[in-house]
Image: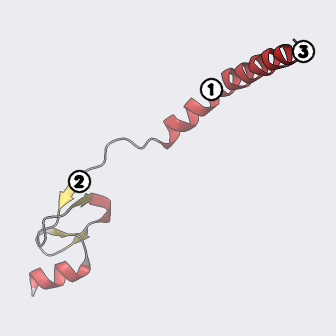
Amino acid sequence: MKYLLLFFIFMVLLWQWRHARAPKVKQAQRKSASGPVDMVRCAHCGLHLPASDAVQGASALYCSTEHRQAQES
C-alpha cells in the first residue's frame, strides 16, 4: 500500500511538471520552425535544393561550383 501511494504521488508530480512545462516547449518549437523554404533545381544534375544553398551562375542556379563550371564552360 505504501508503494502504491508513493507511485500515485510520483505520477501527480510528474503530471504537474509536464503540464507546467508544456507552454514553454510549444513556444520554443514555434520559434524554431522557420516555415516553408523556396526550392530550386540544379541546371546541371537536376537536384532540388534550398535556394539559400544554391550557387548562382550566369543564367541559372547550380548545386555546387563544380556543376556551375562544368555547365558554363
For the residue labelled by badge 3, is the local secondary structure a helix, a strand or a loop? helix
* Crowd band around label 1 with a 10 angstrom C-alpha radius: few (<14), some (14–19), many (20+): few
Contact (Cβ within 8 Å) of mark 1 with mark 2: no
The residue wearing badge 1 is 22
Q: Residue at x 25, y 60 (%)?
A: 49
The residue wearing badge 2 is 39
Asked if 37 appears above or below 72 in the picture, the reply is: above
Residue 8 percent coordinates (x, y): 79, 15
Answer left or right for 2 relative to 24.
right
Kindly identify which numbered label has been placed on residue 2: 3
How many marks do you count on the picture?
3
Residue 66 percent coordinates (x, y): 22, 83
Q: Residue at x 11, y 69 (%)?
A: 43
Answer left or right for 26 relative to 6.
left
* Crowd band around label 2 with a 10 angstrom C-alpha radius: few (<14), some (14–19), many (20+): some
- Mark 3 to mark 2 CA distance (whole Å): 60 Å
Q: Residue at x 63, y 31 (%)?
A: 24
Asked if 40 appears above or below 56 in the picture, the reply is: above
Q: Residue at x 50, y 35 (%)?
A: 30
Residue at the extreme right: 2
**Residue type beneath disc 2:** Met
